[in-house]
């Protein structure tokens, strides 16, 4: 029997939509953490650390009150030339990011952390699973006028790497090697497999 209680430790509407698409209606609890990149931190380490920190934050808040709930946290970043491209601060930064990505390959890393809340949960005391899923994306050599129009649409403003592969930027993609759900923000197939392995299937 599928679990009846899921907590999404993320305010991302994309992750919520991905869970709803498989019939899961989670309780959303936005974590309160510092998402700053540490000095010399690798992109994979960054998303793994943030996914774990988000889970810690939410488990501290809801763990003891939500015994049996599956708590899911995630973080996504774009990497190009070994550099992390997070969410753009403004439209100019969004355009600069897109200009770096056009006509070339980049990687998208999504870290997710999952645990089942139990009695006595106190943040870092949780036992669960942390994993990073990496996908490779190649953009066409998109004309700058199209990139400017995309930035003007406002879609890039809250997206890692300044684009949403499930939105208008789908037309920029020449090739995707990996998990499109992970690029959007949550590898739901892996999340379901891990939840099932912990004895708390989502579907």
Image: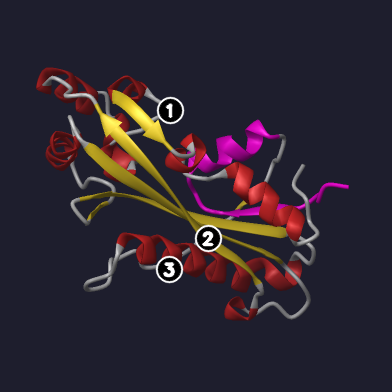
Q: CA distance from mark 2 to mark 3?
A: 10 Å
| Category of crowding for the residue at label 3, using alpha-carbon neighbours closer than 10 angstroms: few (below 14), some (14–19), many (at least 20) | many
| In magenta stretch: residue 97 | no
Above or below, comparing residue 108 to residue 165 in the picture: below
Number of marks present in the image shown: 3
Q: Tell me residue 66's x, y (percent).
A: 75, 64
Which residue appears at 29% of the width and 65% of the height?
42
| Category of crowding for the residue at label 2, using alpha-carbon neighbours closer than 10 angstroms: few (below 14), some (14–19), many (at least 20) | some
Where does label 2 land, which residue?
131
Which residue appears at 28% of the width and 69% of the height?
41
Magenta-tinted stretch: 1-22
- Which mark is first along the chain, 3 or 2? 3
Q: Is residue 31 left or right of residue 149?
A: right
Q: Which mark is residue 49?
A: 3
Above or below, comparing residue 127 to residue 10 in the picture: below
Q: Nearer the viewer, residue 152 or 132?
A: 132
Tell me whether the residue at label 3 lies in contact with that at label 1, contact meaning CB atoms closer than 8 angstroms: no
Which numbered disc, 2 or 3, marks the residue closer to the eye?
A: 2
Where does label 1 land, which residue?
166
Q: Tell me residue 190's x, y (percent).
A: 61, 48
Question: Secondary structure under badge 1?
Answer: loop
């Amino acid at each position: 029997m599928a679990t009846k209680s899921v907590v999404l430790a993320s305010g991302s509407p994309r992750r919520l939509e991905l869970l709803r698409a498989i019939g899961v209606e989670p309780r959303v609890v936005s974590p309160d953490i510092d998402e700053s990149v540490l000095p010399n931190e690798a992109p994979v380490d960054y998303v793994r650390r943030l996914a774990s920190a988000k889970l810690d934050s939410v488990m501290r808040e809801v763990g003891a009150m939500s015994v049996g709930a599956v708590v899911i946290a995630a973080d996504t970043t774009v990497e190009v030339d070994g550099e992390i491209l997070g969410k753009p601060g403004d439209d100019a930064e969004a355009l600069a990011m897109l200009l770096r990505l056009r006509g070339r390959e980049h990687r998208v890393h999504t870290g997710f952390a999952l645990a089942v809340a139990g009695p006595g949960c106190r943040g870092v005391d949780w036992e669960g699973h942390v994993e990073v899923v990496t996908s490779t994306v190649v953009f066409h050599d998109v004309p700058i006028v199209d990139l400017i129009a995309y930035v003007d649409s406002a879609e890039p403003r809250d997206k890692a790497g300044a684009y949403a592969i499930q939105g208008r930027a789908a037309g920029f993609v020449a090739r995707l090697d990996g998990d499109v759900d992970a690029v959007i923000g949550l590898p739901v197939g892996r999340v379901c497999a891990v939840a099932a392995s912990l004895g708390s299937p989502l579907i």
